[in-house]
Amino acid sequence: TVTVTSAVLTGIAITPATSTLAVKATEQLTATGTYSDGTTLDLTRQVAWKTTNKKIVSIRQNGVATGVKKGSATISATKNGVLGTATVTVP
């Protein structure tokens, strides 16, 4: 007997995992999902992007981060309850 099931999202990696941005500079972050069958998929435009401090780093829903002022913030990408994080520093 063979049972076929859909692959389940098991992890999200944000690239780059750490970065430094000047004030007003932008950087494209990418979210790559890893599935239970070992496959990966670019989820950049499918995840919910958030920042822990929008006064330091803003993040658009297409994954573009912008340095706002000096400090550090954690950027998260979430889909189906699976979370990936990255750290962005503005010197």
Image (cartoon, grey):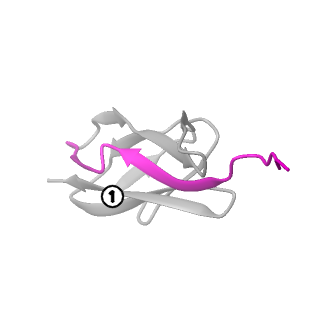
Which quarter of the figure has residue 45?
top right
- Residue 78, position in %: x, y? 58, 56
Please state the total of marks drawn on the protein image. Answer: 1
Q: Which of 70 and 17 lies nearest the eye of the viewer?
A: 17
Q: Of the residues shown, which amino acid type is indicated by label 1?
A: Ile
Residue 78 visible at all: no
- Going 64% across and 40% down the picture, which residue do you hit? 46
| In this view, 57 is above or below 38 | below
**Horizontal side of residue 7 vs 48, given as left or right:** right
Residue 70 visible at all: yes
**Horizontal side of residue 88 vs 2, given as left or right:** left
The residue at which mark 1 appears reads as 56
Does 21 lie within the magenta span?
yes
- Residue 47, position in %: x, y? 61, 46
**Horizontal side of residue 38 vs 72, given as left or right:** right
**Horizontal side of residue 21 vs 63, given as left or right:** left
* Stretch of the chain drawn in magenta: 1-22
- Residue 42, position in %: x, y? 53, 34
Give the crowd class for mark 1: few <14, some 14-19, many >=20 residues within 10 Å: many
